[in-house]
Image (tube, rainbow, N blue to C red):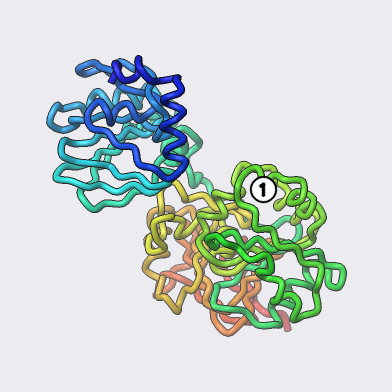
């Protein structure tokens, strides 16, 4: 691979190959032709990798080959230990990793080993996992895992105070919502003076620019701006930032919640969304737009919505700290999933919301509205024990996050 690097890296040839990929073409390589495809390239070394510069076809990775046959686990693990923000990919002989966009598929008689470096600061040991023929992986998730391993552990061991200090949240369990709930959202956003921003970006492209407008038009609201931007330069455009600065309400639509993370995390737009609450406004959302409001992101896996926990996409936007929110809850029988999440992370309060049902949160009190229920899974040391392992709260009742119990109605 060093001979390939010496001949082509940094040349017009490399630019031409990258342009070919940009046009939708195919680049392949075996052995040295595989190792050359990561920018940080293993150019030699039996048990300790000698690092050189290859092509940047597969970003944030270090690729090794003849992996099991030549016993190269130690070599690759050493490389990612030295460069822990990289993902190690060890590819066996007669085995290929097919990459289209962010999706990677394992094909062949051997395996692909994914390696993560240790974190001395947070006491994490190096980690590896093998994948066989037919396995599908998400490259972005793997890169996010590598980064997260070098950050403060999440979720934190100590549960933060569960409250909305200013403003309000409306968290809807998917499956549609009544006009009464829409009216309540508008009321919380300022009534006739409401300036509402709709974010439909949990859905795949193309996104119609009218998404969400009809829902609010039914209750007479016309000052509605739909922002379909999802690329960084568009998300941080003057148009989008200006709309968020003026907003009194933000509505997150349905779809897949990981797309919200990809669109807004670590952008200039995100603090402006939080600022809506600080100004006393409201943030709402349904289905994916409900789950994103939690601290722990339920069902964040880009490869499908069956896993309630997904490494790399486990951080929500934290509008409601200390909780994980799932939706379509009773209708899709997601009780066991939430029980498994809070068993693994007992410091997290699980919240499962039935379809067409809303949880409206102000301060430390959450009121249930709609035809279904909201189910609270509490595994804290002081939790009230229940026969089912969760507390179901019907419409018209309210839950106190401080006391972790249903509020008694005053006479």
Residue 374 vs residue 301, the one in the foreground: 301
Q: Is residue 245 above or below residue 286?
A: above
Residue 130: image quadrant is top left
Name the residue beneath numbered marker 1. Answer: 235
Q: Position of residue 351 (x, y in %)?
A: 52, 66
Residue 409: image quadrant is bottom right
Work out which quarter of the rendered image holds the C terminus and state it.
bottom right
* Relative side of 30 to 262, left or right: left
Work out which quarter of the rendered image holds the N terminus and state it.
top left
Q: Residue at the right extreme?
A: 193
Residue 205 vs residue 333, the one in the foreground: 205
The secondary element bearing badge 1 is classed as helix
Q: Residue at x 59, y 64 (%)?
A: 289
Q: Residue at x 65, y 77 (%)?
A: 408
* Relative side of 285 to 134, left or right: right
Q: Is residue 279 above or below residue 407?
A: above
Q: Position of residue 139 (x, y in %)?
A: 40, 43
Residue 97 vs residue 124, the one in the foreground: 97
Q: Position of residue 380 (x, y in %)?
A: 48, 57
Q: Is residue 387 above or below residue 157?
A: below
Counting every numbered tag in the picture gives: 1
* Residue 31 shows in this picture: yes
* Residue 322 shows in this picture: no
Report crowding for label 1: few under 14, some 14 to 19, many 20 or more residues within 10 A (C-alpha): many
Q: Residue at x 78, y 55 (%)?
A: 243
Q: Residue at x 79, y 58 (%)?
A: 247
Q: Position of residue 292 (x, y in %)?
A: 56, 58
Residue 180: image quadrant is bottom right
């Amino acid at each position: 691979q060093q001979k390939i690097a010496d001949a082509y890296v940094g040349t017009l040839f490399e630019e031409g190959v990258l342009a070919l990929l940009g046009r939708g073409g195919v680049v392949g390589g075996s052995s040295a032709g595989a190792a050359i495809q990561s920018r940080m390239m293993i150019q030699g070394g039996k048990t300790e990798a000698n690092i050189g510069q290859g092509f940047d076809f597969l970003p944030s990775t270090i690729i090794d080959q003849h992996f099991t046959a030549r016993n190269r686990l130690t070599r690759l693990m050493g490389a990612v230990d030295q460069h822990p923000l990289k993902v190690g990919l060890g590819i066996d002989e007669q085995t290929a990793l097919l990459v289209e966009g962010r999706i990677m598929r394992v094909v062949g008689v051997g395996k692909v080993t994914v390696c993560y470096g240790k974190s001395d600061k947070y006491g994490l040991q190096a980690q590896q996992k093998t994948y066989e023929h037919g396995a599908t992986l998400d490259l972005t998730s793997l890169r996010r895992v590598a980064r997260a391993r070098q950050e403060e552990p999440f979720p934190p061991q100590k549960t933060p105070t569960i409250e909305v200090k200013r403003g309000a949240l409306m968290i809807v369990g998917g499956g549609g919502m009544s006009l009464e709930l829409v009216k309540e959202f508008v009321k919380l956003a300022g009534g006739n003076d409401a300036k509402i921003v709709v974010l439909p970006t949990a859905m795949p492209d193309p996104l119609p620019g009218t998404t969400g407008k009809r829902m609010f038009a039914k209750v007479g609201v016309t000052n509605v701006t739909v922002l379909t931007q999802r690329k960084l330069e568009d998300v941080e455009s003057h148009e989008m930032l200006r709309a968020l600065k003026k907003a009194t309400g933000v509505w997150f639509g349905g779809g897949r919640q990981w797309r919200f993370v990809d669109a807004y995390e670590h952008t200039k737009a995100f603090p402006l969304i939080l600022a809506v609450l600080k100004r006393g406004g409201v943030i709402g959302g349904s289905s994916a737009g409900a789950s994103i409001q939690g601290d722990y992101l339920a069902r964040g896996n880009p490869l499908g919505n069956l896993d309630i926990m997904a490494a790399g996409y486990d951080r929500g936007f934290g509008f409601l700290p200390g909780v994980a929110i799932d939706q379509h809850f009773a209708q899709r029988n997601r009780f066991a999933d939430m029980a498994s999440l809070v068993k693994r992370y007992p410091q997290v309060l699980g919240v499962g919301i039935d379809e067409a049902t809303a949880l409206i949160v102000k301060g430390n009190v959450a009121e249930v509205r709609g035809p279904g229920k909201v189910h609270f899974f509490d595994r804290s040391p002081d939790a009230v024990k229940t026969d089912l392992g969760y507390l179901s709260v019907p419409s018209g009742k309210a839950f106190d996050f401080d006391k972790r119990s249903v509020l008694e109605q005053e006479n």
